[in-house]
Image (cartoon, rainbow, N blue to C red):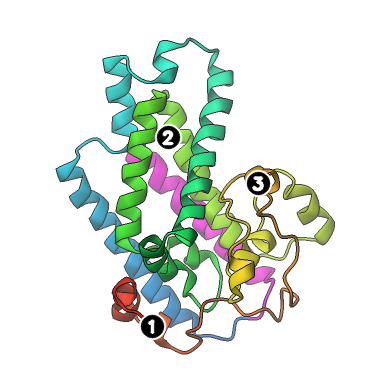
Amino acid sequence: MEQEGIIRLSIFFGLFFVFAATEYIFPRRMVTKSKARRWITNWSVSFLNVLTLRLFSFALPLLAIGAAFDAQNLGIGLFNRINFPFWIELIWVILLLDFFIWLQHLLTHKIGFLWRIHRVHHSDTEMDISTAIRFHPIEIALSMALKIGLVYALGADPLLVLTFEVLLNGSSMFNHANIKIPNQIDKFLRLLIVTPDMHRIHHSSDRIEHDTNFGFALSIWDHIFQTYKSYPKNNHEDMEVGLNWQDEKPEKLGWSLGLPFKKNG
């Protein structure tokens, strides 16, 4: 799959532009913090994440797509041993990978050292499409290691792994975007997928609220495991997003990168 990188980048930038334009035209919340400073920091973190994965690939040359090809060549993994029709394998791969991403997300809130890393993402004091790319490089590396292990265990078709990666990135941008969706449409969509309103509750500064709605793409796991919350304590327009740092600190790149190593920030 020689064009995998080009395909992923093209879809990423295309969706980012679409969602950024949509949240500009149809915003859900008024933005009160400096968008320029936040976006510079969030994009800088994202650029460092790209470099991290490049360095990661030297230590472990086969990232998720490469692992899928390797598992296929070696004949290892569940779906390389059991022949399913393509569409059935597609459904199972999406369900299983999405479940483990949900579980990983849950654990980053429950295990101390993982939360210290993940809170970089949650420290953003506004929530818009740029929040979707605000993850600490350590978290990106750990997440990739998990995905590589899962891909080997599942033996998923490389095309399906690529499909899931695109779905995960696209859904993350969608559910972080500051987009206003009519209530009835939102209520219908969140029966299956995570919507911006649903995920915004997860970014509440209230600890009880940000320990809910862990889904990235599919909302079904939160419904099944009773971690779903339908509405914030305060309405969406007035709820506070972020953690206990509601000043300019999260807008600074150095502070954001150093946050996992600080007790109180």
**Kind of residue indicated by mark 1:** Asn
The location of residue 110, given as percent across then percent down, is 48, 59
What span is colored magenta in the figure?
5-30
User: Which of marks 3 and 1 precedes in the sequence?
Assistant: 3
- Distance from Cα at disc 2 to Cα at disc 3: 27 Å
Sequence-wise, the earlier of marks 2 and 3 is 2
Q: Which residue is mark 2?
A: 162
Q: Looking at the rendering, which quadrant does residue 231 occupy?
A: bottom right
The residue that mark 1 highlights is 264
The residue under label 3 is 225
Whichever of callouts 1 and 2 sits on the residue coming sooner in the sequence is 2
Amino acid type of the residue that numbered disc 2 sits on in the rendered structure: Leu
Q: Position of residue 94 (x, y in %)?
A: 54, 33
Answer above or below: position of 84 versus 261: above
Provide the secondary structure element on which disc 2 rests.
helix
The answer for how far apart the CA atoms under marks 1 and 3 are is 31 Å
